[in-house]
Amino acid sequence: MKNYEQPKIRQPKIKELTENKIDSYFERCEFEGKKLPYLTARGFSSSGNASSECLGVDGRRHEYLSDLERRFGITLSYLTNVSSVKTQYPILNVQATIDVATELNIPHPRFAPKSGQVKDANKGYQAAVMTTDFYFQYADVLTDELKKIAVSIKYDEDIIIHDGVDLVVGRTRDKLEIERTYWTEVRSAEYRLITSSHWSVNPTFVKNIDTARRFRDLDIPDGILKSSRIFFLEALQRPRRYRLNDLIAVVSQRSVISLEKTYAIFWYLVWHKELHVDLFRPLYDASFVFAPKGEYVWAW
């Protein structure tokens, strides 16, 4: 929302320290030979929920600053049409985001130099480089056209004001508005805000596919996979409802394969979308396995 009726807000300046941070980032990218996340979990270790991991065949390191971001990252790795996922993607054109903030008349993110000897020219607040949580490519399910999208991830309570005006919540909403306007109006790009109520970050769903991805690269002959899939499907079509450990035992006995290998095959088939079960219900050993409530594309 543009605050035209409010007095004009004084925006932070782009000073030497901001430029040094950008130069340092370019040096890191050049050294690694690829685009890197601008922020790292190591820098936010005190928060307790920051983490990092490698996902995908490109070996790109993903940096998550919250558990919610990690859940979304795992879901993206499961979706069939998503590729080239980048996390903590920097908007290095700082002047552009300052211009957006000025137009919206909301304060641009800023930082103060650490205490110590600081040049007079660098004293006071500096304009900070803004980042977007995720920036990735996906193939349109209807046209196969490759598209790119910027996505911000936030907990519902970070953007919804329940009682009165909360300063922290207000600042989060301001930053999101700058991001949205930059991507959609300056870059003419697709942008979306995902909150903790979205299906893609559902804790049960993510826990299930996080388990499944551990078995995504099994070295098992195709014949065994095909026959096991048939046995699983036949068992799930029976009137009787099986708990996961019972289902594994039934298929293990029919296929004359160990329980451990049958368990691995179950999750392999789930990951590769060859065995459809309800992933929004817990799939622990003693949990009942249900058929999905509908047909899902599993694509962005």
Image: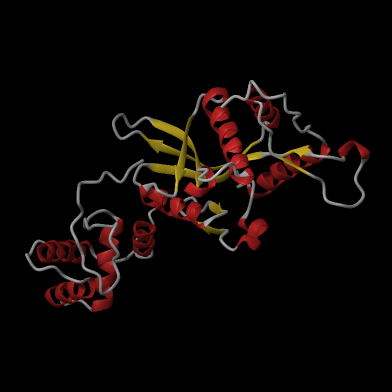
Q: Residue at x 51, y 46 (%)?
A: 154
Q: Position of residue 182 (x, y in %)?
A: 58, 28
- Res 56 seen here: no
Which of these two is toward me, 154 or 148?
154
Please state the horizontal and vertical placement of residue 156, each as a whole percent of the image. Answer: 47, 47
Q: Is residue 191 left or right of residue 130?
A: left
Instruction: Count the numbered circles shown.
Output: 0
Front in this rendered view, residue 10 or 225? 10
Q: Which of 202/188 is in front?
A: 202
Q: Does the rendering let one see residue 160?
A: yes
How far from the left and from the top, in percent, is residue 76? Answer: 41, 48
Q: Residue at x 36, y 48 (%)?
A: 199
Left or right of 94: which side holds 198? left
Corner quadrant of residue 187: top right
Give the quadrant of the N terminus: top right
Residue 234, x across and y down, in percent: 9, 63
> In this rendering, would 81 be left or right of 36?
left
Q: Please identify the residue farthest to the left as the structure is shown.
A: 239
Q: Quadrant of the C terminus?
A: top left
Using the image, determine if residue 49 lies above or below residue 201.
below
